[in-house]
Image (cartoon, rainbow, N blue to C red):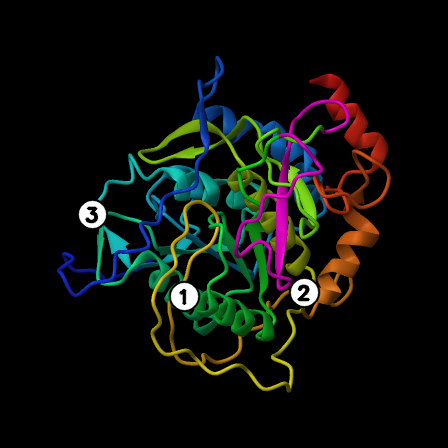
Amino acid sequence: MATTEHFFVVPNEDIDTSNSMKIPHVVVLKNSEGDSLSTLNTGLPQGIKITGGAKLRDAGYTGKGVKVAVIDSGVDKDHPGFNGKVTKQVWYRSGSPLSSDYHGTHVAGTVHLMAPDAEIYDYRVFGRTGDYSVDRSIVLAIDQAVTDGCNVINMSLGGPSPFGQIRRAVKRAYNAGIIIVCAAGNEGDGNAFTNEISYPATYTECISTAAVQKKDGLPVASFSNSNNAVDYAGIGVNVLSFKPGGDVMRLSGTSMASPHVAGLVACILSTSQVGERPDDEVLPPDEDTPSTGFDCCGLFGSSSVPPPADSAPSPSGEFGKVKDDASLREVLNEKFLKDIGVTGPDNETGLGFLSYLSKDELMAILDSL
């Protein structure tokens, strides 16, 4: 049964709300005929299949023993699609119904559909009211995820400017061995030669995830940010996932690509052992500093240095021992990477698309769409 902690009060003049953070700008699409929760119970969404979700399940890689933090707009833990896997909720902000703040439920749904046995930890950092600004809520959420022993953090959020407190929180999580997956951002102009920057995705400690379409060749989405910090690509267009209240909905955005990758990582970690904190000194927490403001992909605050993350209890599997971000990237590049777009690394899709499918299996699914 999920535990829920609420950390919020009605804002007053002493609360910093200058950042004016917003939920990421995503495209809401009309549901296709036949879209329903019952159809998801009998067949996985196309994006999950293209990423290899069905094949991973058949191989027994389901995210069991792995905790995935979803730092977002809140998750409808009672949605029947989650099957009770939203096991903890910490809400730093609230004041708006999940029916309008549907983003977090949709993101968490994709994580769950990729890794059905992973536990989802819901850290709500968006909402009309709260005891903390959105920036500070995000910092507190990152640190709480480390304290709670999460193995993966998904942040489908961001902003155009770096902010020291979030960077330091990200470093603390990274030094704890947590894998941090972020949306690359939705400010793209369709031109690979112009750079659109979003934080925290741009930080080297994060896996910056671009969005591609479910079409032959996996073309990049026109809205997806391009820059030399993009690491990989995931399905981010016309993504079917959960909607608060027990329904389903379709959204497009790099916010949707990121949880495909986070869920894939959870499946990999369910066959491995998450590493312990290295011996390097962890950066001390910051004192409060003014917020700079973000809109769709990165935000910030401060906290005490938390203990190291717990290790995922699953035995080692075909992917070997994944102990940190570096060893994970080695596995991704060796076993999951599919080069798309121009040959080699590029600013739109990074090293390429991530999927557990073989090239022939991937081509067969794309040809059938």
Amino acid carrying label 1: it is Val
Question: Does any portion of residue 150 appear in the rendered image?
Answer: yes
* Label 1 neighbour load within 10 Å: few <14, some 14-19, many 20+: many
Q: Residue at x 44, y 51 (%)?
A: 85
Whole-angstrom CA distance, mark 3 to mark 1, is: 20 Å
Residue 347's place in the image compared with 268, above or below, is above
Q: Which mark is residue 47?
A: none
* Disc on the earlier residue, 3 or 1: 3
Amino acid carrying label 3: it is Gly
Looking at the image, residue 359 sits to the left or right of residue 228; the answer is right
Whole-angstrom CA distance, mark 2 to mark 3, is: 36 Å
Give the labeled residue for mark 1: 139
Residue 90's place in the image compared with 275, above or below, is above
* Label 3 neighbour load within 10 Å: few <14, some 14-19, many 20+: few
| Residue 203 on the magenta span | yes
Q: Residue at x 77, y 43 (%)?
A: 346
* Disc on the earlier residue, 2 or 3: 3
Give the labeled residue for mark 2: 325
Amino acid carrying label 2: it is Asp
Q: Horizontal and vertical percent for residue 151? A: 56, 64
Give the labeled residue for mark 3: 95
Q: Residue at x 55, y 82 (%)?
A: 282
* Label 2 neighbour load within 10 Å: few <14, some 14-19, many 20+: some
Whole-angstrom CA distance, mark 1 to mark 2, is: 20 Å
Q: Horizontal and vertical percent for residue 253? A: 52, 35
Residue stretch rendered in magenta on the structure? 190-218
Looking at the image, the residue that sits furthest to the top is 33
